Image (cartoon, grey):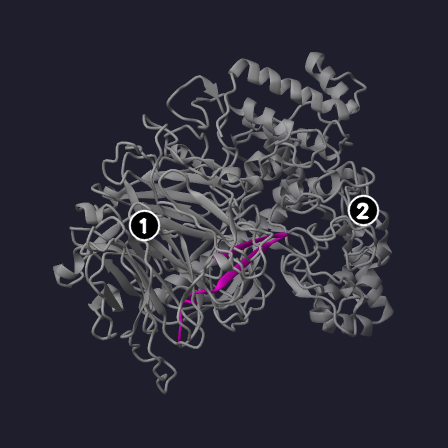
Amino acid sequence: MNTRMILGAVLLTALTVRPALAGSSDAGEETVPPPTMDIPFMHEEAKAAGIDHAYRGGWEFFVGGGVASFDCNGDRRPDLFLAGGTEPARLYVNRSPTGGALKFEEKDLGLPERDLKKVTGAYPIDIDNDGYIDLAVLRVGENRTLKGGPDCTFTSANRLLSFDGGRAWTTAFAAEFEADLPFPTLAFGNYVDRSAPGSPWGTCHDNDLFRPQKRELTEDGKASIPAYSERTALSPGYCTLSILFTDWHRSGTPDLRMTNDRQYYRGGEEQLWSVQPGRPPRLFTRSDGWRSVKIWGMGIAEADLNADGYPEYALTSMGDTKLQTLDEDAEEGRPIYRDIAYERGATAQEPYIGRDETKPSTGWHAEFEDFNNDGRLDLFIAKGNVEQMPEFASFDPDNLLLGGLGGKFTEAGHLAGIDLPTKGRGAALADFNMDGMLDLLVVNREHNVSLFRNLGAKIDPRSPDATKVRPMGNWLEIELAQKNTNLNAIGATISVKTGNTTRVRKIQIGGGHASGHLGFVHVGLGVSERAQIRVQWPDGTWSAPYRVFANNFVRIERDAEQAQYWLPE
Amino acid sequence: MRCRISRVTGLASLLAVVLAGTVGFPVAGIAAEAATRAGPVPWAEQAITAHVDSSLYTGTLDADALKRLRDEGERLFTAKFTPTDGLGRPMATGAITPVKAKRPPQSLFSRTAGMDSNGCSSCHAEPAPGGAGNFAVNVFVSEGFTNADFDSLDPQFSNERNTNHIFGAGLVELLAREMTADLHRLRAETVREARATGKPVEVELVTKGVDFGTLTIQPDGMVDLSGLDGVDTDLVIRPFSQKGVMTSLRQFTINAMNDHHGMEAVERYGARWTGETDFDEDGVSDELIPGDISALVAWQAGLKPPVQKVPDDPRWKQAAAHGDAVFDTLGCNSCHIRALPLNSLKFADPGPFDAAGTLRTGEVPGAVYDLALLDWAATLPRNGDGAVMVPLFGDLKRHRIADARIAALGNELLAQRFVDRDVFQTTELWGIGSTAPYGHRGDLPTLDAVIRAHGGDATPVTRRYEALAETDRSALIAFLKTLVIEP
C-alpha cells in the first residue's frame, strides 16, 4: 500500500472500530478505514420473499443443512430445494421479478414425506441427459435420486436408476462425467457409522462411488437411462463432510478431494482419491507427496485465484480456515499443498464482531464468488456453532471476505449486513433476480433461512439505509451447453479475458457444505466493458474465443460460431 | 492480523509518511506546499489550482451554471498539465482499464506509447481548441495491455490515427443515446412478442433511418446476434473514435486523459477499483475528480456544431450547389446521411449507457443541461415533428471501408475493441472543410484522395465518383469545402 493510498483512506473516513474490523458499528478506540472496494448491500428478505424454512433436528442434523440451487422450470431463474433435517425438504420456485425484490413460491413435490425427511443436503445434476435437472438427495438413511421433469416436477428414481441409496448418514456429494461415459459418476460422502461398536468415536462410514453402467446411446443420439447398480467403496472413510471432483494439476482428469471431520475419525486425515477412468479409485499417499492435514473439515471451495490452471482450495473447519495452494516446488503430479490463508487474510478463525470474538468459530459452506463485481473473487463462509459447544463462539456470523489487490481478503460481512445471529450451514450463491449481482441464501440450523438480496454497492459502508446504493462493477453470467451427453458441461473451464487479466471458473457439482448450484456462472468484470471468453469443454477441447460485451447473460453452445445473449423477462 | 492505530498518532504518522513520499518529486512538493499555505503563486507551474466541485452542478443547470461549468471545462481542455497536476503515468499503461506498467518509461513523454501530450488542445487545435490535428499530431492507438511500452511506428504495435475534431460532439452523443434507446426498445418489444407468441421473432433494427441489421429472438429470450450490422452486440451506439467504439464523451475523456496525459480519473483509476489513489505512481493522488471530468464533458458537449458556409465567390457558390446534388447522386448520402433527427437537446451527465469505470446514472446526483441554452442551438433546423435535424453527414454506423482492390484505408493491422481492422464508423463530414488532411491516419492530403480511397462497402460509390466528369468531381469538392468549423 503506498502512502497516498493510506492517506486517502484515512481522510476518507475516520471510522472508530475494534481491531481488525473495518467500520464496525460497535465503537471501540481504534480507527481502521473500511475497504476501498465496493461493499455490497445484502438485504435480508427471506420471510418477505415467501421462504419459511429451517434445518432442524438432533445430533444427526448438527451437520448438513444444504440447498440445491438450479432451474427446474426452464425460466433460467435459480429455484431452491432446501434440506430440512427432521422437517421435510421443500422446493421453492423462483418468482422474483428481474431486478426486483426476491419472491419464491413453495411447490408441493408430491413425494412421500418419508422421502423428504431426514434430508441433509442436495445437489443438482442432469443424470439422464434429458434436459431436466435431477437431484441427488443426501439423507440420514437411504439417499434418493429425484428425476426432474417439466415445470418443477420430480419423481423418485432410485429404482429406475438401479441405485441403492444405502443406509448411511450421508453428508457430501460430487459428480463428474468421466471420459467416454455418457452419464455422470456419482460420489457420496458419509459421516459417522452410528451402528458400529464404539460409535461415534472412530467409526466413520466408507464413502461411495457409483459409476454408470455403460449403455448404448439411442438412435436419435440421446442417451438412455443409466444404471448405478455397482457401488465402489472408498475406504477408509474419515467422516467426510464435503467432496469435490477437481482437476488439481491440469491433467484433464479430475480426482476426488475429500475434507473430513477429525472430531470423529481416528488416524484419519484429509484425502485425495485418484479417479482414473476405468480403474479403481486409489488414495494418494505419502509416497505421492500427499501431506497429512487433520482438520474439522466441513466444506470445500475451489477457485483458481491466480488463473495459473492450478486451483486453490478453501477448507472450512473449526478455527482456522485453510486456503491451500499447490506448492510451486512440487514436482509434476505430486499433490503437495501449502496453506496461504494467513498471508491472504483468509483464516477467518474467530468471529469478527460480537461477544465471542476471542473464541474460535465454526465454518461450514465455503464458496468463491465475486459479490461486488470488482473482478476479484470473494470468499463466503457460512458460520455457526455446531450446537452448544461452549469453547467455540456461539455468536458466529457468516463471513464475506472481499478479495483485494495482491490476493488479500478483507472481512466485510458486517458492512454488507450478513452478520446475523444464526447458525449457518449450507448456502447458495446465485443471482436470484437476474440483475447481474449475486444474491445469497444461507440455510440455518433451527432458524429460518437467510435470503439476502444484493442491492448494489453501499455509498456509505456504514449506513444501513437500503436506498443509498449505487451500481457495482460490470459482470457477465455464462451458460454452457453441449448436446447428447453432459448437457450442462460439468467439468468445463471458462476463461474470461479482459485486457491482461484472465478470470477462471469451473463448472462443478460438489463441494461447499451439502449444497450445490447449477446454472449461470457469474463473473465480475470490474471496469471492463467487454471480454473474450474461451471454454475448455469437459473433453479438454478448447473453443475459439467468443467476444461479448459486459452486463449480459451469455449462452455458449459447443461449436457455435457466436455466443448468444439471453434476455430475462 | 490486528493492528492498533490511535487516531491522532496514526494520522500524524501517515501524514509524515506522505510528506516524506513527496521528496522524490520536488516540484510537486514545493507547489503543493505553496498551494496549501496561500494558494499557488501566480507563476506556479501547474494547471489545476482547484478541482471542479460537482456538487455545485447538480440537477437541471441554468444558463449561468452551464456557462460556469463549461468555462471550467475549457480551462482544463486548454490547460498545459504539469507533473504537479499529475501529468505522466510512470507505472500505468495507456489502457482503458487500470493496468500497471512493467517498468517506468525512460522519459516522461513518449511519442508512440505515450504519455504523448500535456494538453488536449495540443492536438485538438485546428482551427480552434476542440478542432482536429494535422499529421504531425497523429496518435498511436494501442490497447495498452501487451507491448504497452512499444517504441515503434510499426503497425503491428499500434494503429496510427489522426486527431478528430469534436465540434458538435454533444449533439452526436445525444443522437447515439436516442438511437441506442430505440434499439433497446425494439429488442425488448421483440422479446415480449416472442415470449407471448411462443415463436421466434425477427426484428429489423432501424433507428432514425439507419439500418443495423436484424435480431432473432427465441420464445425463451435467447437472442441470435448473427444478423447484426455495424453495431456492437449490446446494441449500444458508440459514436466516438474513428472506429465508433466509445460510448460517451465522458468515457472518451477518461480514456484520453490517461492515455495521452497520464492524468487519471478517480472514477476509473481511483481507490474504488484499484485500491490506490495514485495508481500511476507519479506522486499525485486523485488527479481528476468527477467534477473535473464533468466540466470537460460539458465544454465538449457544448461545442458549436460545424456549419455550411458558402463563400461569396459566385463560381464557388455555383459549384457547391452542383456538388451538393452530386453528393446525393453518387450515393454518398447513403452512409454520410445529411442530417439525423434529434428529439431532445437535454444532455444528462452521467449518461444512460456507460459501463462501470465511467460514472453512470445512479452513482452521483448528476447534471442535466439543455444544449438549447447555447446560442448556436437556435440556428439548427427542425423537421415537421419539431426534432432538431443534426447536419452531421453521418450515420453512426460502422462499415467495411477497405478491400483488396482499394486498400488505402485498410492500412491497420490491429483490430480495436472487437472491430475488424478494415471496419470504421462513417466519418461525419461536418467540418471537413476545416480539417485536412484526411483518412483515419491523416495521410491523405486532399478530399479527392480520400474519396478515391473508399473501398469495401463504399466501392460502388467510389467507382461512380471516378467515372464523373472532372467538373462534377470538382463541384463535389467545392460542396464539401463549404462544411466548415466556425468556432
- x%, y% of residue B192? 37, 62
x and y, in percent, of residue A403 in the image: 50, 41
In this orientation, does residue A158 appear?
yes
Three-letter amino acid code at the position of disc 2: Gly
Toward the viewer: A28 or A340? A340
Q: Nearer the viewer, residue B360 or A461?
A: A461
Q: In the visual, does B146 lie left or right of A447? A: right
Start-end of magenta stretch: A485-505
Does residue A93 appear anywhere in the picture? no
Q: Position of residue B298 (x, y in %)?
A: 63, 36
Dots 1, 2 in contact, CB < 8 A? no
Q: What residue would you read off at disc 1?
A: A266
Q: Which residue is mark 2?
A: B133
In the displayed structure, B6 sits above or below A499; it is above
Q: Residues within 10 Å of mark 2 (few under 14, many from 20)?
A: many
Q: Residue furthest top?
A: B38
Please tell me the numbered disc located at residue B236.
none
User: Horizontal and vertical percent for residue A296?
Assistant: 35, 45
Residue A528 counted in the magenta span = no
